[in-house]
């Protein structure tokens, strides 16, 4: 380092900050990886402290002397070449974290080792399981066996996010089934597996399960505040009154409607209906059924997600009239191939007209501040042009109607330059709002891939 560089660094404003402030900055700047990050192939500690230690000797000393910076351990390895250096590096990270609680992320694939080989970094982490406060894991069933020793050794574990990469039969799964059953502090569980876990159901506050999960998950988790179950059943059985589930603590739910209708939750405020509602649904259920359920069982819905197919504007309007406190509405509108382009445009025009605030009329959704729409296809510009009037009528608060703060429109496929013109006019609400100091934030995106829309909907309906 030359003299000029050393002088600039010594006199920089950041050098004048006290050590405790620097540590807070380092902590906030850490990058949180999780097991969906397929580009990561390394052992890291949130990718933050190693970078900090390389800046200068003072920062290195400060980072090494700050145990809290080394507590998020991410073992995300996809290639065997990374393994040899991972174990000694992990030992360094663990020693620097002292005895503070650990937040562990593990992503390992079977291809990184032969079946008879031990994954040493994984064993080192397992030996520290008494310190695990949270766990994210995405592993093959073969590597699940390396985690069996953590059973009964998870006294402070509060959060688990777990995914298995390969299917297994009951014999393979049996030793692993109850690995999280003895966790006295566990309150959040997010699992994706074709085989069920045994969990401390009564203490769970948030439960999210995917794939072939039996109905017992909903029946036994009696104290959950947030519940998300998908693909839990493939039958069309309509439960009788004996199947009713009373959930007095439930506040947020992402469920298929045939399961939701079994639940009585007076505190439910976020309701995300995960399957299609309408004539095109796999099960015979109508938007009117949803309206009847909300009117009878939900006192204060503030968020509603719905996938109508086909769109029935009058039924949707009747449903939304049951939700006067609704602040966020999320719609995924599927393509109705049975309707002509003209009929499709008329349906969407009637729907957007219902959402438009008109003088002299009782407004629909007076508390609405966030409107989000996914359209799988737009067959004419008229199908989306009505959103202009929705935005203009809700730009400012008036007559007891809240100002819309956010509008999102995601389109998978659209036709013709006329649609581009309409989307451009909608996007201009951003710049107009900035100049006027008011108006909603507008997010318009066209040509979005199928999988990106699926991920968007999953993110919107996360509880």
Image (spheres, rainbow, N blue to C red):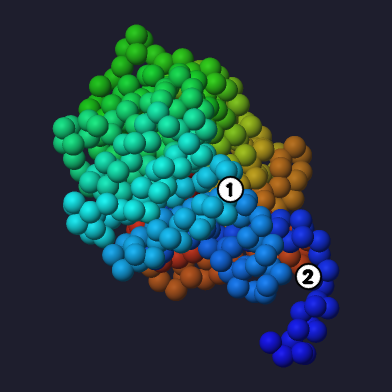
The residue positioned 76% from the left and 79% from the top of the image is: 9
In this view, 200 is above or below 133: above
Identify the secondary structure beneath mark 2.
helix
- Viewed as shown, does residue 407 lie left or right of 456? right
Q: Between disc 1 and disc 2, whose residue precedes?
A: 2
- Viewed as shown, does residue 238 lie left or right of 98? left
Q: Nearer the viewer, residue 421 or 453?
A: 453
Query: Badge 1, how many Cα within 10 Å: few under 14, some, many 20+?
Result: some
Q: Position of residue 330 (x, y in %)?
A: 50, 44
In this view, 195 is above or below 384: above
Query: Residue at label 2?
Result: 14
In this view, 111 is above or below 173: below
- Viewed as shown, does residue 247 lie left or right of 454? right
The residue positioned 23% from the left and 46% from the top of the image is: 142
Q: Position of residue 288 (x, y in %)?
A: 42, 28
The residue positioned 57% from the left and 54% from the top of the image is: 96
Q: Is residue 315 visible?
A: no
Q: Is residue 371 visible?
A: yes
Q: Position of residue 166 (x, y in %)?
A: 22, 47
Quarter in which the N terminus is drawn = bottom right
Name the disc covering residue 28, or none: none
Query: Residue at label 1?
Result: 98
Q: Nearer the viewer, residue 228 or 165?
A: 165
């Amino acid at each position: 380092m030359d003299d000029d560089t050393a002088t600039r660094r010594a006199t920089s404003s950041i050098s004048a900050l006290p050590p405790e402030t620097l540590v807070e900055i380092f902590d906030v700047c850490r990058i949180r990886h999780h097991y969906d990050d397929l580009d990561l192939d390394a052992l890291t500690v949130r990718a933050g402290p190693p970078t900090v230690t390389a800046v200068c000797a003072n920062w290195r000393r400060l980072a090494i002397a700050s145990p809290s910076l080394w507590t998020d351990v991410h073992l995300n390895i996809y290639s065997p070449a990374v393994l040899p250096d991972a174990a000694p590096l992990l030992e360094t990270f663990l020693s620097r974290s002292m005895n503070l609680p650990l937040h562990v992320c593990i992503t390992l694939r079977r291809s990184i080792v032969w079946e008879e080989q031990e994954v040493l970094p994984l064993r080192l982490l397992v030996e520290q399981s008494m310190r695990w406060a949270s766990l994210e894991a995405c592993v093959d069933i073969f590597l699940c066996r390396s985690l069996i020793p953590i059973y009964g050794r998870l006294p402070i574990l509060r959060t688990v996010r777990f995914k298995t990469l390969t299917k297994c039969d009951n014999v393979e799964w049996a030793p692993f089934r109850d690995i999280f059953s003895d966790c006295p502090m566990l309150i959040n569980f997010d699992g994706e597996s074709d085989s069920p876990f045994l969990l401390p159901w009564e203490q769970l506050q948030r439960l999210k399960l995917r794939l072939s999960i039996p109905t017992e998950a909903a029946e036994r988790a009696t104290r959950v505040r947030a519940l998300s179950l998908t693909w839990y059943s493939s039958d069309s059985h309509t439960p009788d009154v004996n199947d009713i589930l009373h959930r007095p603590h439930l506040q947020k739910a992402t469920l298929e409607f045939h399961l939701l209708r079994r639940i009585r939750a007076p505190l439910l405020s976020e309701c995300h209906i995960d399957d299609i509602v309408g004539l095109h649904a796999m099960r015979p259920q109508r938007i009117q059924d949803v309206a009847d359920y909300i009117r009878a069982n939900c006192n204060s819905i503030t968020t509603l997600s719905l996938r109508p197919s086909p769109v029935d504007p009058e039924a949707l309007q009747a449903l939304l009239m049951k939700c006067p406190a609704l602040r966020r509405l999320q719609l995924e509108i599927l393509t109705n191939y049975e309707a002509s382009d003209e009929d499709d445009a008329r349906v969407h025009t009637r729907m957007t007209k219902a959402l438009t605030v008109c003088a002299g009329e009782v407004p629909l959704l007076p508390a609405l501040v966030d409107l989000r729409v996914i359209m799988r296809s737009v067959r004419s510009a008229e199908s989306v042009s009505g959103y202009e009037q929705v935005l203009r009528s809700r730009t400012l608060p008036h007559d007891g109607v809240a100002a819309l703060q956010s509008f999102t429109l995601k389109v998978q496929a659209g036709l013709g330059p006329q649609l581009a013109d309409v989307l451009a006019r909608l996007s201009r609400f951003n710049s107009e709002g900035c100049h006027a100091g008011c108006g909603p934030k507008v997010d318009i995106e066209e040509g979005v891939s199928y999988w990106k829309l699926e991920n968007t909907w999953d993110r919107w309906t996360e509880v």
